[in-house]
Image: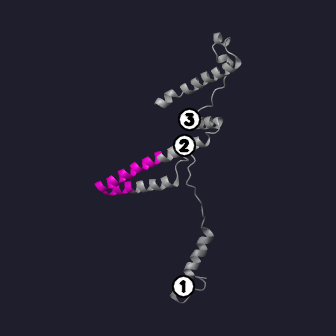
Amino acid sequence: MLITNPPNSLRSLLIAYNTTLSILLDKHAPVITKFSSCKSKSNPWFTCTLRAFKSTVRRAENIWKRTHYAINWSLFKSLRYRYHNLILAFKKQYYSNLISSSSDNPRRLWQTINKLLHSSPLPTCTSDQVVPHQQQFLNHEQISHQTCIVGLVKYLSSYTGRISD
């Protein structure tokens, strides 16, 4: 319409031009709406609030890099410090909620702890782990408790190096 039958007035020419461009854009580059989630799969404690605050800290950092003023450096440092404390608080809250939600079920609690520590499950307890000369003095129930304790001690001792590092 714009080329085959051009309008005479400026206003109608502008309307025809906008209409033609809108039709072409809708045809060749349609608007696509995508919804994004603020949840991170690798860091589920990293929320939209932290993402927004991180953006604020980065903005303050860019302003300081651009100007090199002491006041901008001070603002950036204080925002960075608050951001770091927010991260620690959100992590603490997330992991506390995760552990407390499974505290009523010991099996689920241990699974959660193993998942957080990226470790293998607890070892199974067998009666052959008991020292042979003690086995004659213990009944079956005492053997299973003792072997479980021995297995748990071995399991937890494998983490002492990781925890202290």
Callout 2 secondary element: helix
Residue 122 in the image, given as x and y percentages of width and height = 63, 29
- What's drawn in magenta, residue-wise? 60-88
Check disc 1 and report its element: helix, strand or loop. Answer: helix
Distance from Cα at disc 3 to Cα at disc 1: 68 Å
Q: Is residue 2 above or below residue 123?
A: below
- Asked whether, in this view, residue 9 is left or right of residue 71, the answer is right
**Residue furthest bottom in the image:** 8
Q: Which residue is mark 1?
A: 13
Q: Quadrant of the N terminus?
A: bottom right
Q: Of the residues under marks 3 and 1, which one precedes in the sequence?
A: 1
Please tell me which residue lies in front, 165 or 93.
Answer: 93
Residue assigned mark 3: 117
Q: CA distance from mark 3 to mark 2?
A: 14 Å
Q: Is residue 153 above or below residue 100?
A: above
Earlier sequence position, callout 1 versus callout 2: 1
Quadrant in the picture for residue 119? top right
Residue identifier under label 2 = 96
Residue at horizontal 54%, vertical 85%?
13
Direction from residue 107 to residue 17 in the image, left or right = left
Residue type for callout 3: Leu
**Image check: 70 left or right of 57?**
left
